[in-house]
Image: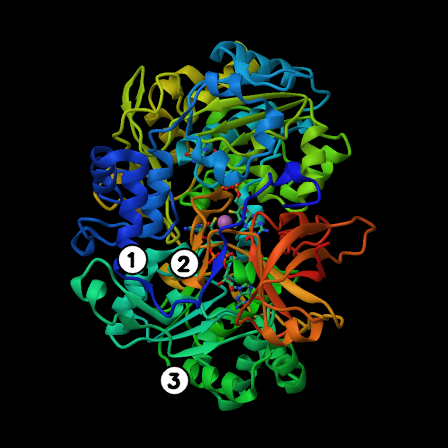
Amino acid sequence: MGADDSRLLGSADESELEVEDPHDHAAGLKAVTVAMQRAVGQMGPVRTARALLRLNQADGFDCMSCAWPDPDPEHRHRAEFCENGAKAVAEEATKARVTPDFFARNSISDLLEQTDHWLGQQGRLTHPMVKWPDSDHYQPIGWDEAFMLVGDHLGALGSPDEALFYTSGRASNEAAFAYQLFARELGTNNLPDCSNMCHESSGVALIDTIGIGKGSVSLEDLYRADLIVLAGQNPGTNHPRMLSALEIAKRRGAKIISINPLREAGLVNFRNPQYPRGVVGKGTDLTDLHLQIRLNGDLALFQAIGSLLVEWGAVDHDFVSAHTEGFDAWRAHVAGVEWEQVVAATGLTRDQITEAARMIADSDATIYCWAMGLTQHRNAVATIKEVVNLALARGDIGKPGAGLCPVRGHSNVQGDRTMGIWEKPPAAFLDALADAYGFEPPRHHGYDTVECIHAMLEGKASVFVALGGNFLHAAPDTALTAAALEKTALTVQISTKLNRSHLITGRTALILPTLGRTERDEQVGGPQFVTVEDSMSVVHASRGRLDPASEHLRSEVAIVTGIAEAAFGADSVVDWAALRSDYRLIREGIERVVPGFEDYEQRVVQRTGFVLPHPPRDSRSFTTPSGKAHFTASAIETLEVPPGHLVLQTLRSHDQFNTTVYGLSDRYRGIEGGRLVVMVNRRDLEAMGLQDGDRVDIVGCWDDGRDRRVRDFRVVEYDTPVGTAAAYYPETNPLVPLGSAAVGSNTPTSKSVLVRLEPTR
Ligand SMILES: Nc1nc2c(c(=O)[nH]1)N[C@H]1C(S)=C(S)[C@@H](COP(=O)(O)OP(=O)(O)OC[C@H]3O[C@@H](n4cnc5c(=O)[nH]c(N)nc54)[C@H](O)[C@@H]3O)O[C@H]1N2
Ligand SMILES: Nc1nc2c(c(=O)[nH]1)N[C@H]1C(S)=C(S)[C@@H](COP(=O)(O)OP(=O)(O)OC[C@H]3O[C@@H](n4cnc5c(=O)[nH]c(N)nc54)[C@H](O)[C@@H]3O)O[C@H]1N2
Ligand SMILES: [Mo]
């Protein structure tokens, strides 16, 4: 059984669950065989060959599994993909179909009984479908009628701010730009996105300190680094192609420090499946120093390292005086670091921390990489600013082989933000939009993800449109998010595959099925391609070649422009039909509005695309109000865990993409055949009178009077620091309190949830 309300998770059969020892290496032959089995199983051999050979090639499509950049063509392999990239392609290019017949056979109540894994396995959505109020079935609807339905609902709103336009980070630049243009012409900045739950803390911290919310390194920098720090990231599973870059860096003499409560296989050793030595050999040992930190101990760790750098005089004073401000205040602050507090917060010894500081002091070029392990805590913004402090103190910005590298998640999440998917758009962006299109966009901020759940709950918003994603299961506090969506008049999901957000809906609900990245996109003006931006600000083209999953699918651009035409009638400043017919016109608009896109059309079709400007990286100039980068001083807070309680992190298995569960094999962690597990240290189990294999309910301890509980999880004894635990997202999202979010970024605190375990009755 899953959550308290079984509608939220379905009823999982976990009878096959088996646990063995975690692995000490990532990839290798097994990764290749799993990738090929899954690919051939879902796509068949011909489609597999056709799809995988186009993946991440200059004339092919961009892998939708993560935002890791592609090597330049000389360093690119003929098969530039990884196990999880192959699974992502198989998931989209599957031969299975969810047809009107499927919806006739399965009522919504029936489908709610199924797990997310099952829902995803049913295949690609083929027809636009509608669920009318009080009906328990989806039925087919024509595209024009569907668009009119959305247009009518939007027209009936008292204010455009009663509409919400969510985006998941897979949408192309073209779709995202058209979507925000539509929302803003309508009159709202309600453009929440998955980034609000993901790297928002990184964006906020970086804009405040260095003036731009993006990372400052290239792949070449990674190859040239002396030292690479990997904090709060599991690259072996979530960015497997990063391991190839780390392997190159290692072979050129780089050292690696990993900071993670878990000893993730991909941090330990990598057997590169692109080379024979990786398939049969021993692989490359990656980590030189592993710091098994307590959850949320990172701020204390980085601050303590800063205090040692200052004490040792290991500061780049030339850089600090030329390019930064706030150094003296920071130095005074870190001089007061109390080691007892640092040791308590980090769970590390002073010797371990000193060793890490020594490696940083000895390195001429350090790169800091991080992901969700840093961004999803209450003090996430302050923690990332502490990383920036170290980079500034050592002059590690705008120098070859050095820099800041927030490793993005969704393949175009960074591009979507560049395109204006942002509830808090900068004034300069809105000014440029006004100039280019001749209308006055709204200036007041819109709702982010957390705020939009509140808005729905309070009846302040009643139309919810999602350009991709699975809002119900990505958002925190599943029961509250479900209640929020169910209060709306209309939910619209522009999707490729069935998920739970199609089942827990507004009174009326639409499913608008769309083309995926792998598929050919033909419009009136001829064949189209789209563009995306990776984690290192490289913009390039993506062309699908496969036959669309159904002749009834429309592209994301076609759907967004169709909704816009229905909403505005003849009354729009934009020629939506023209944009749809030829995406070059959208790129012309982007070129006029967004800096760095000059000669977009010519440059993007070059084999490697082009790199967007990044002032700190390019010229050590900082676009903060003072023109300097900022040191910041933050207080160390230790997460208090009362006796009998644990801090839980919610993370990804090796066999899922966010809310899409590919399968039940978390191979590297040795957990097979089920997902309802909670990983706990042996000492905590002893203290609680539990043991490996016991069945427990995980109970949330957020003090707002709501009962948050997921039922019947299997306890797995695991090497995680005392007082901490880990379980999978999204099954444990019911425990993540809506009211608990990062200060400054409002990102839900999915990596520090206070819980206790109760034996399941
Ligand atoms: N195959 C696959 N690829 C993906 C995704 C996927 O689901 N599947 N998702 C994509 C997306 S959207 C994103 S954002 C990224 C996510 O990529 P990751 O951030 O790697 O994803 P998580 O599984 O959330 O892993 C968080 C890691 O941080 C560690 N951690 C947790 N808390 C802390 C902490 O307090 N301190 C430190 N130092 N470490 C901590 C965990 O042990 C874990 O190793 O991956 C992207 N790529
Ligand atoms: N507890 C907890 N919660 C989390 C996280 C966590 O670590 N812990 N991580 C957070 C993070 S980092 C993120 S990014 C969010 C992810 O949040 P989302 O981006 O909302 O979720 P996904 O699971 O990536 O969305 C999957 C759905 O997208 C649709 N889709 C797939 N491809 C396409 C396409 O090409 N076009 C369109 N239109 N639709 C498509 C499919 O229907 C699929 O079911 O979740 C967040 N939630
Ligand atoms: Mo993400």
Give the answer, above or below, for where 718 lies relative to 504.
Answer: below
User: Horizontal and vertical percent for residue 217?
Assistant: 37, 61
Residue with the mark numbered 1 = 30
Q: Give the residue type that dot 3 points to.
A: Asp
Identify the disc placed on residue 362: 3
Identify the disc placed on residue 279: none
Q: Residues within 10 Å of mark 3 (few under 14, many from 20)?
A: few
Which quarter of the rendering shows the C terminus? bottom right
Q: Give the residue type that dot 1 points to.
A: Lys
Give the answer, above or below, for where 455 lies relative to 73.
Answer: above
Image position of 222 (left or right of 594): left
Say whether residue 165 is visible.
Answer: no
Q: Sequence-wise, which precedes: disc 1 or disc 2?
A: 1
Q: Nearer the viewer, mark 3 or mark 1?
A: 1
Identify the disc placed on residue 667: 2
Cβ atoms at labels 1 and 2 below 8 Å apart: yes
Residue visible at 62% across and 85% down in the picture: 335
Q: Nearer the viewer, residue 126 or 462?
A: 126
CA–CA distance between discs 3 and 1? 37 Å
Q: Nearer the viewer, mark 3 or mark 2?
A: 2
